[in-house]
Amino acid sequence: MATNQIIIEKEQLGSAFICADSPTVRTPSRPKEFRQPGYDEQFDYHCLFYDAFVMDGGSEIRLVGPLLLNLAEYVEAGNATVTDADTDATVPVTNYCLKHMFKVSVLELKLARPLAQAHCNLDFGALGIFTLSAGANQAALFASKRTAFTLFKYEPLSWLVDWAEFNIKYHGVNALLVNHNNCPHASTQEIMRALQHLTGLDTLVVGHWPYLYGPAAGGGGYGWDSDFCQIGLFEQARHKFFSQAEGVLNGDIDELVITEGHASIFELLLHAPEGFIRFGGNWISGNLEHENPSNFQSHKHRDFLYIASDSQDQISTKWIVDPSVCGIENQWRIHGVKALKTPNDLSAQVIMCHFKDINMKWKNTFMGPLVKPVEYAILKEAFRKVGWLKEVRESV
């Protein structure tokens, strides 16, 4: 059982929202003719900032939110008053700076002296006056830890538990951050209860991230341009939790990372140029002609041992990074880290196994039986290493 177990509910986040009846809201950059059905319900018109927190060292407060777009002028012309949450003393703001990154806007408040946590009063003119708390930095929880983090949205809890168990046993992960993104069937407390029995963890943090994920890609050349939520989470997690971590592995619950020779990816990271490894991989499925696709929620990662060689979908990429050598200008993104590359771009030693049928059908459909099933020997060896082989179904 993890020594440090923390749940962060939405009330503990330093968020700021424009009033629902405000005449001024975020204007989408995507023209109306390219907004698919459901776009307006999924687009975040009102959130200014997801969270506010004190940076590691205490001399800066960082507010992270969706890309402000037309709202930037109000925030840029605003001002902030900061008080020490422990003493109520006013702490002068020596620099007020708004920055825009990929899908994210960040407000930096440099302080005259360091503090542990703070209260902020923000005057954004016509948008209103906002009072919020800047939470304490949590980097000490993850100091020198081998960390993995993920977003939990649709999946059964059993899939999350297996994803965590694999990373603990295979890679030596000893710290987890799991973010609850409006999951309809499990609370933060239920996520914590599902994971807290796992052995090998020192730190387990379950955080609520109750924001609109954002619309999917649209037509007319408008790709994934309105999904601010996950990139904002990366920016918050990087600076609030991970600045002292040994390494941070980014992955989804339907992805398991293996390596040639089955070394921990954190061992490989120690020798990686720029403290960064980006990797691709293979689609994985099963030869499940005897399965009823309606029972897909009962499936486990260990049920799938075949390379989905007949899949035409391109595999996405993921990454691991050492935060201590990653410059603040190198933004963490879903499929890479800005301006960081390995010599050959993708590592040949690291393989991401993306499980085609470990999903809730929000994007991909059940794959079904393979035309030419090819058992993936290295994945079978990985399952043997973590003690899953005895539960893997035999080939048919």
Image (tube, rainbow, N blue to C red):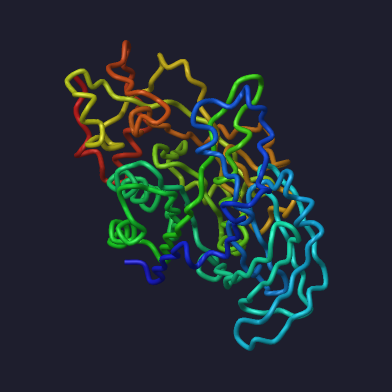
**200 to 331, vertically: above or below:** below
**344 to 106, vertically: above or below:** above
Name the residue at 45% across, 59% down.
207
Give left or right: position of 343 versus 150.
right
Nearest the viewer among 224 and 206 is: 224
Q: Quadrant of residue 237?
A: bottom right
Q: Position of residue 204 (x, y in %)?
A: 41, 63
Count of numbered circles on the image? 0
Q: In which quadrant is the C terminus drawn?
A: top left
Q: Residue furthest left?
A: 290
Name the residue at 41% across, 47% down.
152
Nearest the viewer among 355 and 53 is: 53
Q: Position of residue 150 (x, y in %)?
A: 46, 48
Q: Position of residue 355 (x, y in %)?
A: 38, 31
Q: Quadrant of residue 298?
A: top left
Nearest the viewer among 157 and 314 is: 157
Q: In which quadrant is the N terminus drawn?
A: bottom left
Give left or right: position of 220 versus 6.
right
Q: Position of residue 198 (x, y in %)?
A: 30, 59
**353 to 107, vertically: above or below:** above
Q: Residue furthest top?
A: 371
Nearest the viewer among 332 and 40 is: 40
